Image (spheres, coloured by chain):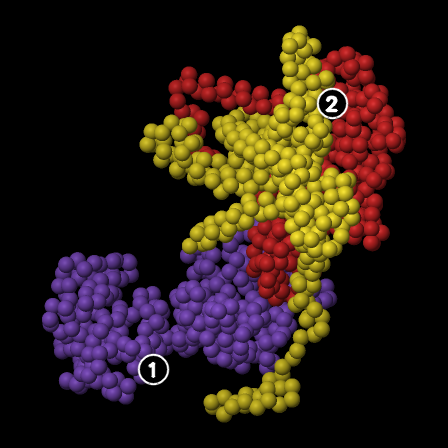
Amino acid sequence: MSDAGFDHTKLGTLQQRIFSRTVVYTVLIGFTILYVLPLIVVTLTSFRSLEDIYTGSLIAFPRSFDFSAWGKVWSTGCVGGNCQGISPYFINSVELVVPATLISTAIGAINGYALTKWRFKGSEFVFAFILFGVFIPGQLMLLPWAWVLGKIGLSNSTWGLVMVHVIGGLGFVTLFCRNYYMSIPDELIKAARIDGAGFWTIFRRIVLPLSPPILVVVVIWQFTHIWNEFLFATTFTSGYNKPITAALIAMTAPQTDIREYNVESAAVIIAALPTLLIYFFAGRYFMRGLTAGSVKG
Amino acid sequence: MSLEVSDLYKSFGPVEVLKGINLEAEPGEFVVLVGPSGCGKSTLLAIIAGLEKASQGDVVIGNRIVNEIHPKDRDIAMVFQNYALYPTMTVRENLTFGLQVRGIPKNEQQEAVRRVAEFLKITELLNRRPSQLSGGQRQRVAMGRALVRNPILFLFDEPLSNLDAKLRVEMRTEIKKLHQALRTTVVYVTHDQIEAMTLASRIAVMHGGQIQQYADPQTTYERPNNIFVASFMGALPMNLVKGTLMNGDGVQIRVDDPDGSSVDLPIPNPNDAIARNIGREVILGIRSEHFDRREHMTGDIPPHMGTINCNVEVTEPTGAETMVVFRFGDEEMVARVEPDSAPGPGDKIGLTVDMRKACIFDPATERRLGA
Amino acid sequence: MATIDLGQIKRTYGAGRETSYARPKPSFGDRIQSWMPQIVMTPSILAAMFFTYGFVLWTLYVSFTNSQMMPSYEFAGLISYQKLWANTRWQIAYTNFFLFGSFYVVITTIIGLALAIFMDQRIRAEAFFRSILLYPMAISFVVTGLVWRWLLNPDTGVEKMVQDLGWLGFQFDWIVDRDMAIYTVVFAGVWQASGFVMVLFLAGIRSVDSNLVKAAQIDGAPMWMIYWRIIIPAIQPILIAVLIILVQNALKTFELVQALTSGGPGIATTVPAIFVFDVMYARGQFGQGAAGAIMMLVMLLVFLIPYLVYLRMRRRREAE
């Protein structure tokens, strides 16, 4: 109820208001602690030495700040047998996410543009057809994809994963872009057609300059989703080609040696950092872009 | 001919939106397509522009049948209701966009822009973005974009609907002046019949996917083809009432009152169609300005005028005149009288009617007898 | 009267005026242009057809075979489905889905709604709270599962910490308890999703027409009643959308469980997604895996199709 002239929180007696204010802030702060706790614990753990960790629980303040875990995780930590640290897997993720996001966004924009500004017979059906794919659980696709990737020589490669993610993401990116482009007036396109511009000229000179809000949304969404994804990552690659989320599971699987919680914590932070940073810095553009094109239902 | 539309039909799926349109425009004409929403006028304009394809029939622009031709090659320009200015480009870029796409050399582009900007007085605006312009300025830039192309045909799609009333009147005059200066053929769509009357050389009144009448403004106003045109055109719709044609003192029409009395009004110069329908019930149409206070007539009443006595229900002063609402023949009618001679509500007054301007309509076909 | 003459058309008018017109045809480039949208959409359509629906159909077909280690293509009726339902692992997975699913959806919705209502109280630093509560959506399920695995582990997490503080009898070992482990999954899932749900509800609450609320206040209703009887019903569409999103999440839950408990202890927290994954690859029960995957799809459609119908009806009603 956002109404400038009316504030429902100013109702009631002073006592009632103090009481409800206290309750509200207590609950919110309580939840905030609960939410932030894991992040803090993991960060702090990465700065503790192993004996420090093993003499207590994970939920404790470091007795002294030990940065050795960080050096180790990058170049010498062990991931299921390979002890070259987590850097190759991080790079794998980058090599996967960047092309996949860019290609996916480009396709989504073009699809959304074609479907809304150049409506043809059956375009609504085509949209629903493409959209429905997002609901299908990934498990149904594992073996067929593995077979296809094998046939075209892309199994166990980053580009194979790129292909899987681009095709798997078609539904969402088309949805976002289509909903946004619906709000561009059709008359703009009509005027451009009369001016003599064709499909691609209109896209390049009129629609694309208007697209930044939704492109930001799509890029953030795809980046986050692909970076954090595990099922396809672990199925279609192995060993050195794994992206970082899959590597993380391999690294933290129960081992016979002493578990190096500090190294594992550092790995977790590194794995989570890119998406977290994007969220904290670009999050508001994401929200803004979503409401600009009203992505509903 | 600048434009010919012949036997045009258009359906969207099962819905037939245009049912046999025939239209031509001579070079330099200002043709207005007017009608209520849903009558098909915007669709017709879109088909002329090439933005939609007709289901059947031909569109001829210049001397070419353009059915298969893309909008950009039809030698037309279009001004839209919402201006449709490219928001990310400056005014200058908006004007040159079409020229750029065609590969016109840069110096010619700039020359065209200079010419048009001077003509429309938008030279100071050339480096601004559309979002920085007022409604009237945007409209002029939209027209500039059309002018720059030197087309055979100008198409306007309700360009003034988004402006407030005062601005609308101003821009209407500017459009008329533009047309007089350029003499390019115009096809103009609007739902506002005042715009149609003031701008058009010929008006095509549309309803239900068909052209009801295609004639100059005065004709559509004074001699409407059917009841629809009579009610639609004019600031006030034509007053309509049932009556019976009869032979009395010359051809007359008798209008009955629910209370049992009746009034006989003369029909001066009846045409053949009227003569053939003597004895039948018809519909009489009289425009509000053809009534006058009985008191104003000194001496005898001339044979072409009738008189009626009525009760005033409501009066509505508008400053320039007063509208008097009264009942006649069980219908509510409006008469326009000078404010000085305005009656009060409940008064009984006498009115004269100039029957030379009256129209008679067939109640079944709704067509005017003699149309 | 009309005569057709070569590439031109002659027309005769009532007044006897005859003119001929050229009838130009569009260029090749222009004709390609008019098909451009379809050309552009074709790759996506083909990709969806083959890689999405094609794969589903393939899995469907295999589910009707008796594949063991590798997919065979001999039609075998419902035998894989029978084996599936007789499989204890599947039964546990299936039960877990309903257990986990219902708790997850209900608790997340309630918490999300409650948080949204609290956030609607003109909080100072609202942006701050919102950022914090929403950030779990930005991290992967794997990270969430891992971190909570450590925190809920009796040897390293909360139990140990509390014991270290002196309370030696404190026990919180749900994660290794066969019967309670599934609730830890619920906990982690709720933790991850409630912020997102809160944001959706908040947007909905904020878009309720304030005149409704003013009218209720003039009628003397207290704030809690206004929330309960006016605002919550007004955001019904969002409520339903949230439920659908959560149910879908619950069904697809794989990474969270894998990271949190690896499906354990033993197979106590296995869910359909994990079952299908393990069985399709590891245990030579390919047909059952395919059948399980199809069951997952069916369960999804059971929730989805009524929702789509509901959306259609609502759109139609709004258009009237």
Q: On residue C243, which mark appears? A: none
Q: Which residue is mark 1?
A: B371
Residue B264 drawn above or below residue A35: below
For residue B131, side relative to residue B21 (left or right): right
For residue A49, side relative to residue B91 (left or right): right
Secondary structure at badge 2 equals helix
Residue A194 drawn above or below residue A170: below
Which amino acid type corresponds to the residue marked 1 in the rendered image? Ala
For residue A197, side relative to residue A239 (left or right): left
Colour of chain C in the image: yellow
Colour of chain A in the image: red
Query: Horizontal and vertical percent for residue A47?
Result: 78, 19
In percent of the image, x 66 and y 62: which residue is there? Answer: C37
Which amino acid type corresponds to the residue marked 2 in the rendered image? Thr
Name the foreground residue: B102 vs A185. A185
Query: Horizontal and vertical percent for residue A158?
Result: 82, 44
